[in-house]
Image (cartoon, grey):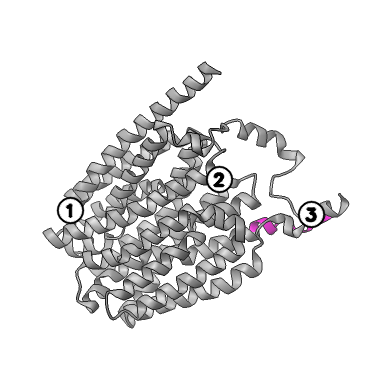
Amino acid sequence: MKHRTEAHGFHLSYHWIVAAVAFVMVFFHGGAANNLTGLHIIPITEHLNISRSDFTLAWSSKSICEMFTTLFSGFLLAKFGYRKCVCFGLIGCSLSYFVMSAASSLIFPFLSGVLLGLCSTFCATAGASRLVSNWFCRYRGTVLGLVTSASGLGGSVLCIVQTALIEAFSWKASLIAVSALLLICAILVPLVVRNHPSEMGLAPLGDGEEVIGKRRKSLEKVKEGLPFSQLLKTPSFYGMALATFFSGFGLYMVFTVVVPHFREGCQFSASSAGFIQSFMLLFLTATKLGAGFLSDLLGSRRVAVLCQILSSLSLLMLILISSFPLAVVAITLYTAALPMVTIMPPLIALSLFGYRAQPQYTGVFLALISVSSFAGSYVSNLIFDLLGSYRPSFAVALLFSVLAILLYLFTFFLAKKEDEGKKASA
């Protein structure tokens, strides 16, 4: 016991070192992923002389592979540990960007998407959630929000850097630079991070007698829930699944086409369109933290409805406006809704279904977000190829956003009735 106390005192700040390293990793990986299609779709499709819908269809290999990887991410992380999985993920992602930089035909985006889809899950929300859960009891939600918010900050910074590289050199130079950064992360992250604090003689931060009262108070807010096999028999599970897909579909119809829309649809300069995307990704950092904080304060269900309302308002504005100031306002509202495809689905599901089947249903909902990412991006670019504008695709996105609001409200109603039914039969 004496050894444990001394070790704990000596390594008291190491939990935050682990969080900081995870933040840096997500900064580069998530930031680069946010910019991949938005900044490069125009030069790549022009270089390959292909349509954007053809490119998106080839790139759909990423979402398809990512869906299956996400479904089994809990099992893989438990079997091999975070260090091995994230090292594998970073090396694979680095190779993916290098393959894309060498693109000379449509097969290259397809292969790049396969590599990124198989490997990126471990470097994103699924991996970060596992690591933070292992290292933190106290501040778990705050730290997870902080770590995942690094993708927005990284996207904003890398957007400026990558735009400069594209203009000064080429789009290939931009992708090679990202490949090198991720390879460096693949070497450094496993050197610092351990799978669990027990490997260093530590306990998770906050896992002690001095905070056990607070922990119990917190845990009482989350019900145990049903086993996954029984959860699959409840209508609210399928309502949540459909609402998650509809929400993600509407949001992702915009996310990857921000720069092309403002450059071609609104006639903004490349620097103005790049500024808006950079602002969006920077503000995303704050919205993830804000959504997590408000979920603790108001409840994740209320925050979900608020985010969907903001999504619908932003999409309506994007359909109607063409001026730069209003474009910034629209993107601000849109970005405030983006936690619906990052931290909110796991928080909403925990509120609805409890912690008993959390690993299984988290994988399902994250996989649905991956599917919605491909579907939304593909449909948006297909509509552009057919009609020459992204505004009609934003109208479709608005329809799905409104439907998502109704689905979430209906799902919350179903879950409440199911809980009441269980209490009555108990």
Residue at horizontal 39 percent and vertical 58 percent from the top: 281
Quarter of the rendering containing residue 56: bottom left
Residue at horizontal 40 percent and vertical 74 percent from the top: 97
Q: Secondary structure at mark 2?
A: helix
Q: Secondary structure at mark 1?
A: helix
Q: Where does label 1 land, which residue?
A: 391
Disc 3 versus disc 2: nearer the observer? 2
Quarter of the rendering containing residue 179: bottom left
Q: Where does label 2 land, which residue?
A: 141
Q: What amino acid is found at the position of numbered circle 1 in the picture? A: Arg
State the residue in front, 79 or 112. 79
- Mark earlier in primary sequence (1, 3): 3
Tell me the CA gap for discs 3 and 2.
24 Å
Residue 149 lies, in percent from the top left, at 48, 55
Q: Is residue 58 magenta?
A: no
Is residue 117 visible in the rendered image? The answer is yes
Provide the residue span drawn in magenta.
6-16
Q: What amino acid is found at the position of numbered circle 3 in the picture? A: Gly
Tell me the CA gap for discs 1 and 3.
58 Å
Instruction: Tell me, yes or no, whether the two marked residues, 1 and 2, touch with CB atoms within 8 Å.
Output: no
- Callout 3 crowding tier (Cα within 10 Å): few <14, some 14–19, many ≥20: few
Q: Where does label 3 land, which residue?
A: 9
Q: What amino acid is found at the position of numbered circle 2 in the picture? A: Gly
Residue 245 lies, in percent from the top left, at 34, 45
Residue at horizontal 64 percent and vertical 57 percent from the top: 16
- Callout 2 crowding tier (Cα within 10 Å): few <14, some 14–19, many ≥20: many
Disc count in the image?
A: 3
Tell me the CA gap for discs 1 and 2.
36 Å
